[in-house]
Image: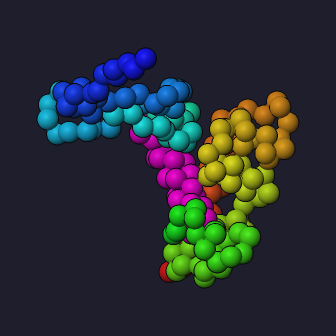
């Protein structure tokens, strides 16, 4: 028995394209605030906040417009940016198979990667072991509670307060390493 399947018309396809779809699983980190068009009343697209952005918006890093909160947010963002730059290979995942080796392409580090690694090393020298563990966990996308767990701190630790201490240490380390560069 042959059945006819309905084919999508052009109108159906256009309507599907105009609709902004939500992420498949919406978490507390998802916000619908990205502009898709400059036209007034245009629908907004979804994006996922980092744990640091969410904490800043919830004023867990201090009053939102205070210099202290901005300093913590900028320090965490800069450390994450440096971490991401140091980890990026500049090529897609298929590059691992190009050279015939088990993993990696054997390509030299880029100048940006080298600079980011040097800066991370100099920042990490100013951090304690626990601060370093917390910042690396945050840079790789873990939640605040997970970062505290990676640092092997006791369960009684006030999570936000300890994260703020680590962000203050990174902010101080960024200032110290920036002065040495000059």
Q: Position of residue 83 (x, y in %)?
A: 60, 61
159 vs 37, left or right, is: right
Q: Is residue 32 visible?
A: no
Pick whichever, 172 or 53, lies toward us. Answer: 53
Q: Quadrant of the N terminus?
A: top left
Q: Position of residue 14 (x, y in %)?
A: 21, 31
Pick whichever, 72 or 37, lies toward us. Answer: 37
Pick whichever, 15 or 35, lies toward us. Answer: 15
Pick whichever, 4 or 101, lies toward us. Answer: 4
Magenta-highlighted residues = 62-89
Asked where in the image residue 123 lies, by quadrant, the reply is: bottom right
Asked where in the image residue 107 lies, by quadrant, the reply is: bottom right
22 vs 176, left or right, is: left
Rendered residue at 57%/64% (across/down): 94
Q: Position of residue 60 (x, y in %)?
A: 56, 33
Exactly how many numbered labels are in the figure? 0
Rendering colour mode: rainbow
* Magenta span dominant secondary structure: helix
32 to 4, vertically: above or below: below
Asked where in the image residue 159 lies, by quadrant, the reply is: top right
Q: Is residue 78 magenta?
A: yes
Q: Position of residue 136 (x, y in %)?
A: 68, 54
64 vs 16, left or right, is: right
Q: Is residue 3 visible?
A: yes
Q: Is residue 46 magenta?
A: no
């Amino acid at each position: 028995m042959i059945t006819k399947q309905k084919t999508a018309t052009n109108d159906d396809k256009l309507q599907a394209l105009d609709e902004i779809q939500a992420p498949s699983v919406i978490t507390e980190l998802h916000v619908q605030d990205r502009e898709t068009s400059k036209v007034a009343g245009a629908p907004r697209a979804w994006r996922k906040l980092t744990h640091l952005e969410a904490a800043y918006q919830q004023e867990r890093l201090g009053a939102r417009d205070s210099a202290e909160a901005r300093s913590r947010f900028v320090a965490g963002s800069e450390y994450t940016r440096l971490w991401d730059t140091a980890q990026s290979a500049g090529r897609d995942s298929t590059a691992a198979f190009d050279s015939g080796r088990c993993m990696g392409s054997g390509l030299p580090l880029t100048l940006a990667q080298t600079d980011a690694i040097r800066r991370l090393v100099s920042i990490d020298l100013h951090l304690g072991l626990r601060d370093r563990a917390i910042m690396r966990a945050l840079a790789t996308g873990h939640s605040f509670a997970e970062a505290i767990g990676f640092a092997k701190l006791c369960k009684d630790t006030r999570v936000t307060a300890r994260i703020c201490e680590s962000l203050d240490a990174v902010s101080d380390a960024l200032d110290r390493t920036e002065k040495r560069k000059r």
